[in-house]
């Protein structure tokens, strides 16, 4: 018995605690009953093995005999990002996260975890009853929307100030024009280079 | 442990070998309902970590067949049933009907079905065909078996070649200060705790005594080898308070 076992027990309980809040994720994982997914954390040199049970709850093992059905490997940060629905595929294509073994299993496993969508309102309603939970949920959602709006407006105002008023930063149109000019210049140089090479090949005694 | 012929020990008492099974039954009938709670209290929750390590040493693969002896309330069987997958099979067993009933109810409540079976069996005479299981385990149960050697031989017989047996059991602390502390704990604190929680000090006194009468690491390893097992190893947990013995059948 070591700290390692204690940590594994703790992580396993936290993950299952979270999963218990999302019955859909549990159902998805339950379809993978008995399959073993390895998670190799580069840098730390640690591999954790997850085995979904009949009810979708995960068993976490520090070691197994033989090979897991599939292994996802990457740095802890890359693996967390790979779970992100919007940017997950980018991580995979950039080669930050590698998959060995049964790729379909790896995908189903990470999708089940990435799609973790906890219905806080439902959880809250067990404590406060449906009506109060719904009202609180509505309030929280409105606050979140307001926050998002504020963030967008602030970003727009800031960029306008920097480009139009303080003129510290170039306007996107100016940047585009500049980039086009650079492209033109680069092409001109390349053409000139080719021309000079051609002239040198022709030699001095053979003017064109 | 030098018993007269036909005699065996029940805690520190010497009793007729034929009597021990029913005495042990009395103990577990009495504690069945509070068994899980008492385990957590007695071991400060550490028994979960002991069992977790046993699971890793079991090296279960999907599709395998597992026999869990003296399952009690089924802590190991619960995890085994998830690890063998829908194609595997786990037999949860106990000699005690009350314990098995509590364990079976718990498995059903947790939604286990299809890859698990229940059997009230005596570990000394397993009613199974030879070469049937990939893994046979007995966690905190061998101590209560009347003829331990016979039980180990039965486990060997039930295993397929290539299979393994795991014995998770209380053992002998490997250093003196820990042993003293452990003695005080088990003879003074434990029976009181049993009295408070399960209203049964006697059963918990038996628990402490039976642990002292159980063969130590080396003796048990010798017994396992004598039963025919090969490549036997022992792992001490929590300073030897508990040990996991493992043996293979080839």
Image (cartoon, coloured by chain):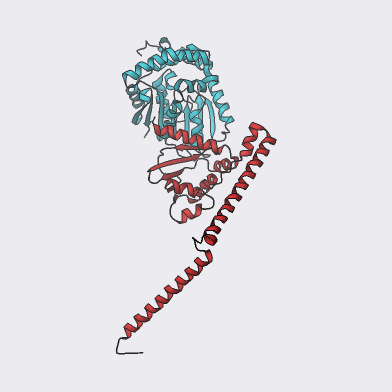
Q: Position of residue A207 (x, y in %)?
A: 33, 90
Pick the residue in front: A151 or B27: A151
Q: Residue at x 58, y 26 (%)?
A: B105
Q: Is residue B137 visible?
A: yes
Locate the N terminus of chain B by quadrant: top left
Q: In which quadrant of the rendered image does the C terminus of chain B lie?
A: top left
Quarter-wise, where is residue B230 in the image?
Answer: top left
Task: Kindly identify the residue that appears in the image at 41 percent across and 9 percent down.
Answer: B13
For the residue pair B34 and A76, the one nearer the viewer reads as A76
Residue B159 in sight from this viewpoint? no
Residue A201, compared with residue B80, is above or below; it is below
Please state the horizontal and vertical placement of residue B187, each as a whole percent of the image: 41, 13
Can you give x and y, in whole percent of width and height, for residue A183 in the image?
Answer: 45, 71
Instruction: Tell me which chain appears red.
Output: A
Which image quadrant is residue B224 in?
top left
Above/below status of B130 relative to A162: above
B140 and A144: which is toward the camera? A144
Residue B137: image location, x then y, percent: 44, 29
User: Residue most toward the right?
Assistant: A131
Chain given the colour cyan: B
Looking at the rendered structure, the number of numbered marks drawn on it comes to 0
Query: On screen, A64 above or below A75?
Result: above
Report whether A168 appears left or right of A152: left
In the image, residue B200 above or below residue A151: above
């Amino acid at each position: 018995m070591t700290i390692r076992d204690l940590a594994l027990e703790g992580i396993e309980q936290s993950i299952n605690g979270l999963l218990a809040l999302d019955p859909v994720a549990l159902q998805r994982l339950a379809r993978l009953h008995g399959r073993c997914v390895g998670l190799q954390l580069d840098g730390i040199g640690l591999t954790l093995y997850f085995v979904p049970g009949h009810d979708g709850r995960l068993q976490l093992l520090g070691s197994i005999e033989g090979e897991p059905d599939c292994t996802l490997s990457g740095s802890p940060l890359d693996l967390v990002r790979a779970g992100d629905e919007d940017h997950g595929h980018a991580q995979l294509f950039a080669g930050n996260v590698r998959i060995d073994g049964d790729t379909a299993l790896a995908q189903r496993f990470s999708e089940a975890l990435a799609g973790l969508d906890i219905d806080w309102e439902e959880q809250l309603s067990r404590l406060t009853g449906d009506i109060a939970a719904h009202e609180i949920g509505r309030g929280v959602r409105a606050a979140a929307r307001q926050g998002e709006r504020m963030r967008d407006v602030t970003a727009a105002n800031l960029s306008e100030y920097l480009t139009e008023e303080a003129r510290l930063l170039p306007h996107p149109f100016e940047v585009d024009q500049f980039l086009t000019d650079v492209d033109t210049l680069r092409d001109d140089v390349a053409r000139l280079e080719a021309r000079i090479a051609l002239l040198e090949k022709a030699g001095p005694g053979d003017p064109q | 442990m030098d018993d007269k012929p036909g005699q065996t020990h029940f805690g520190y008492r010497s009793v007729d070998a034929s009597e021990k099974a029913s005495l042990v039954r009395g103990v577990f009938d009495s504690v069945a309902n509070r068994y899980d709670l008492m385990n957590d209290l007695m071991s400060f929750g550490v028994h979960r970590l002991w069992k977790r390590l046993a699971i890793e040493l079991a090296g279960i693969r999907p599709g395998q067949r597992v026999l869990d002896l003296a399952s009690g309330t089924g802590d190991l069987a619960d995890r085994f049933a998830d690890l063998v997958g829908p194609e595997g099979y786990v037999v949860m067993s106990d000699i005690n009907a009350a314990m098995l009933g509590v364990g079976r109810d718990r498995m059903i409540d947790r939604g286990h079905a299809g890859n698990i079976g229940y059997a009230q069996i005596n570990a000394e005479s397993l009613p199974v065909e030879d070469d049937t299981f990939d893994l046979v385990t007995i966690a905190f149960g061998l101590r209560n078996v009347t003829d331990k050697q016979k039980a180990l031989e039965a486990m060997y017989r039930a295993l397929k070649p290539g299979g393994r047996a795991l014995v998770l059991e209380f053992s002998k602390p490997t250093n003196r200060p820990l042993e003293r502390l452990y003695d005080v704990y088990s003879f003074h604190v434990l029976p009181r705790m049993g009295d408070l929680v399960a209203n049964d000090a006697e059963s918990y006194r038996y628990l402490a005594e039976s642990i002292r009468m159980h063969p130590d690491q080396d003796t048990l390893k010798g017994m396992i080898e004598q039963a025919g097992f090969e490549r036997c190893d022992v792992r001490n947990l929590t300073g030897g308070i508990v040990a996991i013995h493992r043996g293979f059948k080839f």
